[in-house]
Image (tube, rainbow, N blue to C red):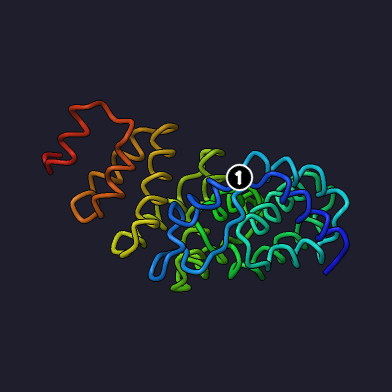
Amino acid sequence: MGIMVEQIKQELAKYVIPEKAEFLPKFFQAHPGGYGEGDIFLGVTVPMQRKVAKMFYRRLSLGELEALLQEPVHEYRFTALAMLVYMYEKAETEEKRREIVELYLANTDYINNWDLVDASADKILGPYLYDKDRSVLWELAQSGCLWQERISVIATFHFIKQGDFADTLKLAEFFLDHEHDLIHKAVGWMLREIGNRDFQTEFAFLKEHYQRMPRTMLRYAIEKFEPQLRRDFLQGLI
């Protein structure tokens, strides 16, 4: 283990809140049978993890960062991903960005809870793929791994921000019959983000698919709609 990684761990240890350490395993379902089964939490808030990430990311090699990302403690993985995001944003060459994305894709086994996905997928993978072949999104979507599936959807948030909705809509249709609510929530959220920018595009997609759509996905998608329109969707009247 590198000296720098140990320093990061020591720095994070300064911000442990015991009540958080008790609360977080329940919040992230680390219990047997939960989606985060077996995860370990120190009890450090996200702002403090980001603070530590900003302190260290310029001094860390990708190899050291990968070691931290593969740690069993949740906050170590989150802090590693926060640093990877900062590294990506500051990368000055395409080669450096490619190295960061290759590390990201090689370590999806450790990007294994929704907060880890949501803090990284649209900030690393999304920007990298925007002007490239996006077939890796479909490899992730068809992987059968919940977290890789969520990465595929959330990565497209970057495309949505550029007014590019096609991949999100294709993935949303692909995941209509998915069994897990964490995919339902992710897809519903992305559909809502499309609607925030182009209501008609979201409305047309929902009109075609809402009766087949999982209830949670629909609720997330229509959250910002006018009350009457929301009721009509929920009551099957569209």
User: In the figure, 35 relative to 115: above or below?
Assistant: below
Nearest the eye: 42 or 191:
42
Q: Quadrant of the C terminus?
A: top left
Q: Position of residue 149 (x, y in %)?
A: 47, 63
In this view, which residue lies farthest toward the front? 18
**Residue type at tag 1:** Ile
Other-residue count near label 1 (Cα within 10 Å), few / some / many at <14 / 14–19 / ≥20 = few
Nearest the eye: 210 or 227:
227
Q: How many marks?
A: 1
Q: Which of the 4 image quarters holds residue 101?
A: bottom right
* Disc 1 target residue: 17
Q: Do we see residue 198 in this rendering? A: yes
Q: Position of residue 102 (x, y in %)?
A: 71, 66
Is 100 displayed left or right of 18 in the figure?
Answer: right
Q: Position of residue 20 (x, y in %)?
A: 54, 47
Q: Residue at x 26, y 26 (%)?
A: 226
Q: Which of the 4 image quarters holds residue 45?
A: top right
Q: Quadrant of the N terminus?
A: bottom right
Q: Residue at x 67, y 63 (%)?
A: 104
Q: Which of the 4 image quarters holds residue 96?
A: bottom right
Nearest the eye: 185 or 97:
185
Q: Residue at x 11, y 39 (%)?
A: 237
SS state under label 1: loop
Nearest the eye: 152 or 179:
179
User: In the figure, 162 relative to 127: above or below?
Assistant: above
